[in-house]
Each structure stands twice: as structure tokens, then as C-alpha cells.
Image (spheres, rainbow, N blue to C red):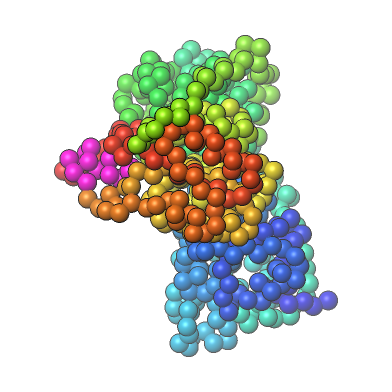
Amino acid sequence: MKKRVYSIIVDHLKSWGVKHVFGIPGKSISPLMLELDSQEIQYVLGRHETGCGYEASGYALGSGTLGVAIGTSGPGGTNLITAAGQAREFQLPVLFITGQPSMQDTGRALSQDSSQFGTDLVKMFEPVTLFSARIERGDLLPLYLRHAIEKAYAGEKGPVHLCIPFDVLMEEIADFHIPLPDYAGTLVSDHLERAADMLEQAKRPVLFLGKGAMMADALEEVQVLAEHWRIPVVTAPGGKAAFPTTHPLYLGGYGLGGTKQAMDYMKSGIDLMVVVGSKLCDMSLSGFTEEMEPERMLQFEYALTFAGKSVQAPTEIVLGDMKRNLQGVIALAGARRREEDYRPLPLAPFQPDAGDHTYLSARDTFKALRAALPDDALLFGDAGSHSFYAVQHLDIVEAGTFYFDEVFIAMGAAIGYSIGAKLARPDRTVVCITGDGCMLMHGTEISTAVNHGAGVIFFVLNNGRLDMVEKGMSYNTGRAVGAVYERPLDVCGFAASMGADVYCCRNTASIAEAVQAGMASGRATVVEVMVDPQEIPPILTRLLSLE
């Protein structure tokens, strides 16, 4: 039986459990749009292709299945590239599909040409995806689609890209079916006995958790590791939610947004630093000095690229599937949770303040937010000082509920991620922690949330500036250039124009009321918090030198 290429692609998406696809239409991809509608897969019309890519990524994260973003040829495709880079850093399986004028016309002058004769999208996507290819004939679809989906799912997951010309989409080919690749085995290290021995011998260890521990779904395993060997825990900014902040072994964050308690322990003579899922980038190790260098390191990672290179200590690297490798170490040692010894600590009581304030402190802002939310609320931190305040002050009661990236750090990404996650998980409270700078980049995606019924709570810290840039530049060079808005954004006015429910807060009592109203309404809600523009964010250990 023969079918059109566009129909076979949509058949696969449906069989893989994809219920939402994100994009902005154009001629070269119009057959896909029509077929999605025919097969009752919801097409989510974004406001900018980059935002669509973020939404597809958030959908992949929230649903546990494939995210799909579709962009037309030329600029529709180039606008997706930043989203692909962010998806790669989050290790998310996202399929980016871009269009191209008809293959038979390639080599002639074409509008929005995405081939090697124009804006070559295949080459442009290569550095930010695990696989990027152009399907130049319909009969190549089975092999190329299989390559793409295997790359997206096998080992360390990530985004892939297929560019499909219009006439290829319209070709009729023999029908086929490719399952999601659960047939590829996971990589388990043969160094697990050495890792278990190092843990047994350690006298003053520390467990350093990064975003990779969360993306590998190794949350239970790291708790066993910490409790069985009684290891104090610190987290990189992106690993903030890899361990509950209410756990007695938790010392706080390290790097930007870190705590004094974590910093002091790192100076106390560590003999073994156990790293799970962190590249140990400059943001994660900000403030690291020679006196903090451990005697030895044990590092669990998917890839060798950065492992053992940031800290100059003898390092045992355990490569492969982090969850499976940790399970192997736990089994070898007969390790177990010690829940009777480590009961969660209670959160400090919070009393809302109804006073009239010009500005709020970020600390009080996040204490108020936590008090208003259920423990299992999913939170997405955007790029900026607002998220580093959250890293420092926001308590995480349930592990795996706060997502933030300190490596690629695309401004405005959390806006799209939260929308995609909410569409995937309508049962969960979803909060986007963002700032006025990020809103100016991708705040129009709030219109997407309104139009598609994604009841995200957008929690916006407004201080009229690109705060992280302005404070860091001022601290390090004595002056800042181009980081303060002459006319700050009216966040509520902006969001109201798109149909969102809006609240402007100048005290913590109003924050609690606004967040609770947003949860009750189920509608897209913007909570604008007027924070002190002179407050110094926890980012000043990241130095800038002009010498």
C-alpha cells in the first residue's frame, strides 16, 4: 500500500503518542499542517518559531515522549536553531522538521531556499542537534526517519532535524512503520566495583549534583547514594531540584546562586567529590578555589567530552547511562535509603505581608511563591538573575520539580517550556519564573498559552533592566552599558493585551493571592512582582576582566 510522505510522517507521530505539534505554517510545510488536523493531532500555533521550539521541548519534558516543532523554509527554519541548542543542553528528544521549496527546482534561484544553494538549514542545524539531514527522495524517508529517531532516543537523548522539500512531502511511497527505539541497550560501565570501593573508603565526601541527574531520572538513586554513605549534598544551579532542599543532608547550591554553608563545606578538606550529571562549567564552579579541590573525584556522565577536565584532581569516570550505573553501584554495595535517620526538615513558617511597598526583595518574593504553591508544582527558571535568586531562596520539597539550565542559557526559553509542559501535563501546576528582559524577547508566547488553554502561571520579576548583565558589568568594571531600559516594560499591560489574567504585586500577601487565583482559574496568569532594582543578585563570583 502506498501513501503520501506527509501522511506517513503524521502516522508515525500519532503512533509514538505525540498529541501536540508546535509551529508556524508556511507553504513548504502546509501538507503536514493539513494532515495533522485530519489525524486530530493538535497543532499549536506559536507566535515565533523559536518559541515553538521551546514549547515542543517543554512538551517532550512534560510528556516523556517526542516533542515536535515544524518551521517553514528559510527564516522559519533558522528561527528554530536556538531552540534546538537549548533542547540539546536539556537532553530532550525533539524532532525539528523544516521545509524547502521543491527538490526538482534546487539550483535555481528560489525564495526562502534552504538547500546548499541558499540558507543551508542542514548544515546550520548540525552543531545543535544529534542528527541533521535533508530527505531528497521519498524512498529515503524510512532510513532517514529511523536514523533520526534512534539518535533522538539512544543513549544521551537530544534533538534531531529533518529538512523535507515540498515535492518530497507530496510523493507516494510504500507504507512502513518504525517503533520508538526501545531495542537499543543502555551503556553500563565496567568500573562499578571501583566506584563502590571509592565510596566505602571516603572519610569526608561531598555529592555534587547537576542537571544531568534530573534528566537521567536518577533522583531516587542519588538519595540512596547520599543516605547510605551519609554524604552531604550540594547542587549546581541546574541541579537545584535533583535533591530536596528539606533533606538534612542538603547543604545548598554551589556556584552562582550558591550558599555559604555549601561553600564552607567545600573548603573543609574534601577527600572525595562525587559528581553526577554536571559538566562543571564556569557557572557551576563559580568561586571554586584551590583549597576546595578534593583529593579524588568520582564522576558519573553520559559523555567523556568534559568529564575530568574542570577540576584538576585524579578522577574516576563512570561513563554511560547514569541511572543504570548508579543502580549497579547501589546493588554491589547493598545500599539502601535511611529514611528513619533523615526525616525532611519543616519549611520555615512564612507570614505574608500586606504592607504598601515600592519594591520587594527577591528573597521574600520566592518565599511567598513557595508558600502559595503545592509541593509538586513544576517550575521552569528562565535565563537571568531571577532564576539565580530562585536557586538560592526557593525551597524544593519534591525532587525533580525545578528546571533550569546554566550552560546554554537562552533568554525566554522557560516561557515556551512551561507552555509545552502544561499542555503535556494539564493536571499539574506549572510556573514559569522569568524576568522583564525575557518577556521582551518571547513574552508574546503568552498569547499562545491563552489561545490554547495552557494555564501557566508566569511569575515575572520586573526591575526595569537586564539585571544579571547590569550588576555583573558594574561590579567588575565600575560601569554598565546598554542594560537598563529607559522606559521599563509594563508587564501587566503587555500580558493583558494578549488576554491573560494579570496581577501586579508590591507585597507578599498579594503574591499569595495572585498565585492562588491563577491556580483556581486554570487560565494563563501573569503575576508581575516589582522587585528592588538595586538588590545585588548572587552572581558576583563570576568575574569579568578587561585586562
Q: Position of residue 427 (x, y in %)?
A: 69, 43
Residue 185 in sight in this render? yes
Residue 155 in sight in this render? no
Give the quadrant of the C terminus. Answer: top left
Please state which of residues 211 and 336 is positioned toward the viewer in this rendering: 211
Residue 424, relative to residue 539: is it above or below? below
Q: Which SS type dominates the magenta stretch?
A: helix
Is 479 magenta? The answer is yes
Is 30 magenta? The answer is no
Q: How many labels, in total? A: 0
Please state which of residues 454 and 185 is positioned toward the viewer in this rendering: 454
Please state which of residues 192 and 271 is positioned toward the viewer in this rendering: 271
The magenta span reads 466-480
Which quadrant of the structure image shows residue 262?
Answer: top left
Residue 312, relative to residue 523: is it above or below? above
Please state which of residues 181 and 282 is positioned toward the viewer in this rendering: 282
Q: Residue at x 75, y 65 (%)?
A: 40
Q: Residue at x 77, y 76 (%)?
A: 3
Which quadrant of the structure image shows residue 190?
Answer: top right
Q: Position of residue 334 (x, y in %)?
A: 68, 18
Using residue 517 as the reference point, say whether residue 82 is left or right of it. Answer: left
Give the quadrant of the N terminus. Answer: bottom right
Q: Position of residue 294 (x, y in %)?
A: 40, 22
Residue 443, relative to residue 186: is it above or below? below
Using residue 472 as the reference point, say whether residue 149 is left or right of it. Answer: right
Q: Position of residue 101 (x, y in %)?
A: 55, 81
